[in-house]
Image (cartoon, rainbow, N blue to C red):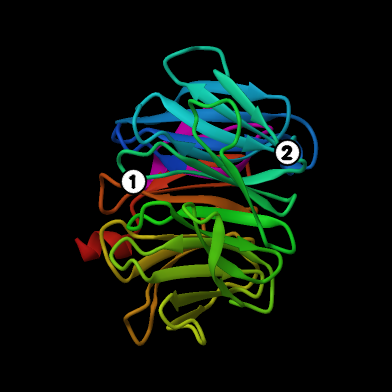
Amino acid sequence: MSATPGGGVRTLRVPGRHGYAAEFSPYLPGRLACAASQHYGIAGSGTLLIVDQNESGLRLFRSFDWNDGLFDVTWSENNEHVLVTCSGDGSLQLWDTARATGPLQVFKEHTQEVYSVDWSQTRGEQLVVSGSWDQTVKLWDPTVGKSLCTFRGHESVIYSTIWSPHIPGCFASSSGDQTLRIWDVKTTGVRIVVPAHQAEILSCDWCKYNENLVVTGAVDCSLRGWDLRNVRQPVFELLGHTYAIRRVKFSPFHASVLASCSYDFTVRFWNFSKPDPLLETVEHHTEFTCGLDLSLQSPTQVADCAWDETIKIYDPVCLTMLT
């Protein structure tokens, strides 16, 4: 594994590992987790990579192997050492970065690939939500050995499950059935169904500044914003990607700024409140770009990972101009 600090972009090369998800630690500045897979996730094993930054670039702090591809990762909200990954064998894994081996625990109930996992940010409840190709969402308490409940309703594979940062017990999911769905843990039922695209929806995210605003990214190359009080039509549509949008993230620092990455190899930054919303296009990968995160601690720092066997951390020009 080699790290290069050149050109303001810090790069860690991970031979034989294709990146699926990247998530900054909510506790430790500069620490990043990356979920990766062998053979593009089609076969082989997976690796959880824990990466730190220093003056000379990126260094691998620790790595954990799993016997199937890893597709997503989420940090614990109550322990800086703990994370959860999900994999192609239908299981979730609980890891502790303070230990050299793992996992601490494995949760296996899904019957197909688990593509999404997210740890609730609501204080006082430690809940994880997972979305699977078996068309179900499951709710977990990591201290309990089995799922708390299962949510059914999607009619195709589930690609994304994201907790609301505002409303306790509320999460969004997106699916190959072309819908965005909003769920309530208390009723174990779906609250809102949005026919958001006429294509598979690979990603969704909640605005950090508006509890009613959710964005979707789809195979039709578009990003759409939805006001959950009136979902008949999107409040914005962002066009520019030339292949499927794999992941979308709202900025933690700017209410109308978001980022997206795509199978067109690019990462794009947007301000949906502007007449010309595309702020910047970053083209530093040579394969599908799957993982993307914006730092909670640095207003300008972004991480991404791709199938070109690299993880990158950088400060896009457009974000440095916003601060």
Q: Residue furthest front?
A: 187
Q: Write the residue at 65% across / 53% down.
A: 287
Q: Is residue 261 visible?
A: no
Which element carries disc 2, helix, strand or loop? loop
Q: Can you give x and y, in whole percent of width and height, for residue 104 in the image?
A: 54, 18
Residue most extreme to the right? 43
- The disc label shown at residue 122, or none: 1
Helix, strand or loop at label 1? It is: loop
Q: Residue at x 45, y 39 (%)?
A: 127
Q: Nearer the viewer, mark 2 or mark 1?
A: 1
Residue drawn at (48%, 39%), measured in percent from left and top? 74
Q: Nearer the viewer, residue 119 or 199?
A: 119
Q: Which x, y percent locates residue 291?
A: 54, 49
Give the total of numbered labels.
Answer: 2
Quadrant assignment, res 56: top left
Q: Is residue 153 left or right of residue 230?
A: right
Q: Amino acid at mark 1?
A: Thr
Judging by the rendered image, the residue that carries numbered circle 2 is: 88
- Verify CB contact (< 8 Å) between mark 2 and mark 1: no
What separation in Å lies between label 2 and label 1 (alpha carbons)?
A: 28 Å
In this picture, which residue range is highlighted in magenta? 1-22
Q: Quadrant of the C terminus?
A: bottom left
Question: Residue 3 lies in magenta, yes or no?
Answer: yes
Relative image position of residue 262 (x, y in whole percent): 58, 62
x and y, in percent, of residue 303 in the image: 43, 47
Query: Is residue 278 shown left or right of residue 301?
Result: right
Query: Can residue 3 be spotted in the picture?
Result: yes
Looking at the image, is 194 positioned above or below residue 164? Answer: below
